[in-house]
């Protein structure tokens, strides 16, 4: 395994949402839950249903190796009341019995490391669970040293201290602690009180929590909602147009950079530790600030792309803006097509298999690091869930549906009922079926991952973007005398290719019938062309 401190640059990371990846042994899972009775939130009634566990992930490492994945990011598996499915942590140093125990975690990291797969874990710095011992202590008295671990405030005119809204339920971001008649801040659910990172005791305790996992061999963290850490300490009201939007969509305060520097100090002892930030802010300019020339985070997710996946204008704008940042300060975008909070790529692309394949091909040619959400490599769509079966207060169940592994045996999960139903078309889209089909989405992803990982042109090549007419977008990646040109057709009609791109060698095609002979690129199609020539400015 590489030991360099920028191993994550131009790489591929695979996101695992453990609840829905794979379950190793339902009987054992039930035993664990019964043995260690973890407090569960009021809105959570799912312990009686099956969901994935850490051993299940370990059992699928061969699948991941075969796919070509060299690092995995695990969504939270910490002890949690599960009000927000693990993003409300009640113990940062324990595995929730639903997912296994510490031995299972250590064994997963050991086996993964042997297979040259790095493990990155989700870390939730902005808030704890309201059942975390710190919060329980804080509630006990105004004098408790833990009181200042959170944001407690006096009421304003008999109500909350300001007009901020929380995520998911469109409620105030403040809840009343009736015993002290003070409000506490929660940018997410009321079960997720925000931590005060301006308190040095919080910084020290949280960094200790992170070191614990680094000492267990993890290669870094995906930092949850990291743009929420910096707070406007005057707690001014949000101005009118924003007063209806959840604060977490726009919360930013420059003081966050001091906090990030403290987090980054971890790198002194752990130089390989990746700090991958979820900065869920609307502009690339703001998102990239969190990178601060290598003094803040190492990479940030490039969410603006996700919201215009089928729009050529959106791709053009986002890539151009990122290119400037890459050139100016070596910024590393982490490209995502979906995740556990967002509808799946294919669901946002009108269920079109063809366009989803083309988008995947184009996305893998982008300079930066690709982060794949589990199941996107299978071309899954969101599960359609009966309203009575919905479980997430944020309405995000669809993309969190379990992965179908095999045609039989409830897609490989055994006979117990699972926490969510399977995605549509699991009979044909399950892993086993796709492994057997050379033209499957899974095999396309395998080819793309291999290209991205192993080909020097996609690793280090310069990037240039060009729009051709109103429907074609091309990225040229160039290294010495070789260039790859990825072209995608966003329109539903075939398009004429520029003359110099006709009849060239196709390195990889998104769809089985992709071709350029005749000088056309088909509707919603994409290809990568390989050219050997001296550097030229155009395509
Ligand atoms: O998400 C933070 C975040 O900004 C998202 O809430 C986003 O706004 C929303 O999900 C879009 O639908 C992270 C986690 O990814 C999410 O699962 C958690 O619920 C949230 O933090 C709170 O920890």
Image: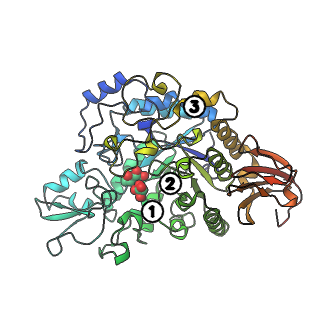
Of pointers 2 and 3, the one earlier in the residue sequence:
2
Q: Are marks 1 and 3 in contact (CB under 8 Å)?
A: no
Q: Are marks 1 and 2 in contact (CB under 8 Å)?
A: yes
Identify the residue shown where x is 39% and y is 68%: 251
Pick the front one: 285 or 119:
285
Query: Which label number is shown at residue 428?
Result: 3
User: Where does the image place residue 266, in percent across and percent down from the top left?
Assistant: 47, 54
For the residues marked 2 and 3, what is the alpha-carbon distance in whole angstroms? 37 Å
Question: Would you identify the image quadrant in which residue 47 lies?
Answer: top left
Query: Which label number is shown at residue 260?
Result: 1
User: Where does the image place residue 34, in percent across and percent down from the top left?
Assistant: 25, 27
Of pointers 1 and 3, the one earlier in the residue sequence:
1
Q: Is residue 523 left or right of residue 311?
A: right
Identify the residue shown where x is 44% and y is 29%: 55
Identify the residue shown where x is 50% and y is 69%: 286
User: Where does the image place residue 467, in percent across and percent down from the top left?
Assistant: 73, 65
């Amino acid at each position: 395994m590489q030991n360099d401190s920028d191993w994550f640059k131009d790489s591929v990371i695979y996101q695992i949402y453990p609840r829905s990846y794979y379950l190793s042994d339902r009987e054992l899972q039930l035993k664990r839950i019964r043995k260690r009775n973890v407090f569960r939130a009021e809105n959570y009634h799912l312990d009686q249903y099956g969901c994935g566990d850490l051993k299940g992930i370990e059992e699928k490492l061969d699948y991941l190796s075969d796919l070509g994945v060299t690092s995995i990011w695990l969504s939270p598996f910490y002890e949690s009341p599960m009000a927000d499915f693990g993003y409300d942590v009640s113990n940062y140093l324990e595995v929730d019995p639903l997912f296994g125990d510490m031995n299972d975690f250590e064994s997963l990291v050991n086996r993964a490391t042997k297979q040259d797969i790095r493990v990155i874990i989700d870390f939730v710095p902005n808030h704890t669970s309201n059942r975390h011992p710190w919060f329980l202590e804080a509630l006990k008295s105004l004098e408790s040293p833990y009181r200042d671990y959170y944001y407690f405030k006096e009421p304003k005119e008999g109500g909350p201290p300001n007009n901020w809204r929380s995520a998911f339920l469109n409620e105030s971001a403040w809840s009343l602690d009736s015993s002290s008649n003070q409000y506490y801040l929660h940018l997410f659910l009321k079960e997720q009180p925000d931590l005060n990172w301006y308190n040095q005791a919080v910084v020290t305790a949280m960094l200790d929590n992170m070191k614990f996992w680094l000492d267990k061999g993890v290669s870094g963290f995906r930092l949850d909602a990291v743009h929420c850490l910096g707070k406007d300490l005057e707690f001014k009201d949000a101005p009118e147009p924003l007063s209806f939007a959840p604060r977490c969509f726009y919360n930013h305060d420059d003081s966050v950079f001091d906090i990030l520097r403290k987090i980054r100090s971890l790198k002194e002892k752990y130089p390989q530790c990746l700090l991958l930030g979820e900065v869920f802010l609307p502009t690339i300019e703001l998102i990239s600030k969190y990178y601060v020339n290598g003094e803040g985070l190492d990479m940030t997710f490039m969410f603006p792309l996700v919201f215009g996946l089928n729009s050529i204008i959106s791709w053009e704008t986002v890539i151009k803006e990122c290119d400037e940042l890459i050139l100016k300060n070596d910024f590393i975008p982490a490209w995502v097509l979906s995740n556990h909070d967002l509808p799946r790529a294919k669901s946002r692309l009108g269920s079109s298999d063809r366009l989803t394949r083309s988008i995947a091909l184009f996305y893998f040619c982008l300079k930066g690091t690709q982060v794949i959400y589990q199941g996107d490599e299978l071309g899954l769509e969101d599960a359609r869930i009966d309203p009575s079966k919905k479980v997430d207060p944020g309405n995000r169940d669809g993309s969190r549906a379990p992965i179908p592994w095999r045609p039989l045996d409830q897609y490989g999960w055994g006979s117990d009922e699972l926490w969510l139903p399977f995605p549509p078309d699991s009979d044909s889209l399950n892993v086993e079926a796709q492994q057997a089909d050379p033209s499957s989405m899974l095999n396309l992803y395998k080819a793309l991952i291999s290209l991205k990982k192993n080909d020097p042109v996609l690793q280090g090549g310069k990037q240039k973007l060009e729009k051709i007419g109103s429907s074609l977008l091309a990225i040229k990646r160039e290294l010495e005398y070789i260039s790859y040109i990825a072209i995608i057709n966003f329109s539903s009609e075939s398009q004429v290719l520029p003359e110099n791109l006709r009849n060239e060698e196709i390195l990889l095609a998104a769809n089985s019938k992709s071709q350029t002979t005749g000088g056309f690129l088909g509707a919603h199609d994409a290809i990568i062309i390989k050219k050997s020539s001296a550097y030229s400015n155009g395509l």
